[in-house]
Image (cartoon, helix red, strand yellow):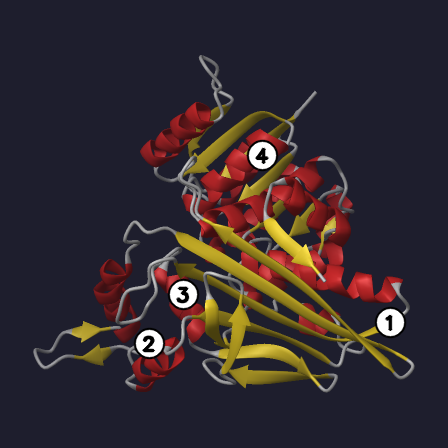
Amino acid sequence: MGHRYAILGSGRQGAAAAYDLLKHGEADAVTLFDLDAAAAQRAAQRLNTLCGCGGSSVVTSQALDSADVARVASALKGFDAALSAVPYRLNVGVAQAAVAAGVSLCDLGGSTDVVRQEVALDAQSRAAGIAIVPDCGLAQGMANSLGAYAMELLEREGFTPESVRLYCGGLPRAPKPPLDYELVFSIEGLVNEYDGVAHVLRAGKLAEVPTLTELEELDLPAPLGRCEAFVTLGGTSLCPWTYQGKLRDYSYKTVRYLGHCVKLRFVQALGLWSLQPVTTRTGVQVVPREVFAAAVAPRLLPGGGGDLVVLRVEATGRKGNQDKNVRIELLDFSDPATAFSAMERTTGFAAAIVVKMLARKEIAPGARTPERAVPAEPFYKALQARGFKISCS
């Protein structure tokens, strides 16, 4: 007997997660919930066709306002596990609804402050006998789970882990100026990562590092070659706090094509990401970040060349006078056969792996982030089973 899954949000990542659960999640039924009933129905039809469900509808859809906690709790009852693929600002309420419904849940994350509020539901989750696992997308989720796996590999050989460095980027295969970048998720989420302060571990202590700093170049597998990486916020999630007292350093950087960061610094310096309203010459009040998003997003739409995702984990450990390095590297491309982008695959499939673990009761009750909750080696093997190009050396 298979599992019944609920997906809140039928957009890019939600649809990809649903597809993965149909292919690998032992799914008897998947229900897509969305405020936009027509969008959810289109996504369900697409997935039923992709998976060759024939006349049966393994994937169904329902209209639901995920901001309505009581309605979400009612909708989730009876499912084996659920995924929240809605805007991160809704995830606290969704997690509360999951506790009320008695259904284990993970989400795609997007805000460390929101994640803190979710893990504060630990006692309630344990009492309800369910697990809440926030930040389960690409980076934060996959990146930090693979960081945990790299640490496990060091410990198996008797090395004490000392540092973990994460690098991740979603990029167009055919970059175009001026930014050599295409949107693979919302521009609001993108700007949120670029503007603020990142939390890291430095010399064993918690530290705050401004975004768009500590620019470095690195060589990545073909077709990427020489790229750059710089500090962005959110990628470490709660790992600096998890590993305080155990690791010396823990950090995350975003990967882009060369020259990208200096252009972002220019935009930031002009105040175009400010959330404080300004008054135009004609007396109209506008929020610079909203104007930036409205003006720029249409110019960064995917151009049809496809995308790729690169993820690198660098972990170091020490045993006596001997040092050891572990590198885990993943490179993925958009899939013409399913029309899922690399970002959709790496984000949605990664979350679906956790959803399946939740349905199979492989994650203990409580509210914890992936590095604490998700079994690292089974997660790595699940990525391999999905055909991801991933290596460990």
Residue 48, percent from left and from top = 45, 24
- Residue closest to the eye, 9 or 384: 384
Foreground disc of the pair 2, 4 = 4
Q: Is residue 29 above or below residue 195?
A: above
Task: Calculate the distance from the C-alpha at mark 1 to the C-alpha at mark 2.
Answer: 44 Å
Quarter of the figure with residue 391 = bottom right
Q: Which residue is mark 2?
A: 273
Q: Are marks 3 and 2 in contact (CB under 8 Å)?
A: no
Q: Residues within 10 Å of mark 1 (few under 14, many from 20)?
A: many
Q: Is residue 296 above or below residue 362?
A: below
Q: Are marks 3 and 1 in contact (CB under 8 Å)?
A: no
Task: Calculate the distance from the C-alpha at mark 2 to the C-alpha at mark 4.
Answer: 37 Å
Q: Amino acid at mark 1?
A: Phe
Q: Quadrant of the C terminus?
A: bottom right
Secondary structure beneath dot 4 equals helix
Foreground disc of the pair 3, 1 = 1
Residue 64, percent from left and from top = 43, 37
Q: Amino acid at mark 2?
A: Trp
Secondary structure beneath dot 3 equals helix
Chain-order first, disc 4 or disc 3: 4
Foreground disc of the pair 1, 2 = 1
Task: Calculate the distance from the C-alpha at mark 4 to the C-alpha at mark 3.
Answer: 27 Å
Q: Which residue is mark 3?
A: 190
Quarter of the figure with residue 158 = bottom right
Chain-order first, disc 1 or disc 2: 1
Q: Which residue is mark 1?
A: 159
Say which residue appears at 45% left-offset and 36% top-offset: 33
Q: Is residue 103 left or right of residue 41?
A: right
Task: Calculate the distance from the C-alpha at mark 1 to the C-alpha at mark 4.
Answer: 36 Å
Quarter of the figure with residue 248 = bottom right
Chain-order first, disc 2 or disc 4: 4
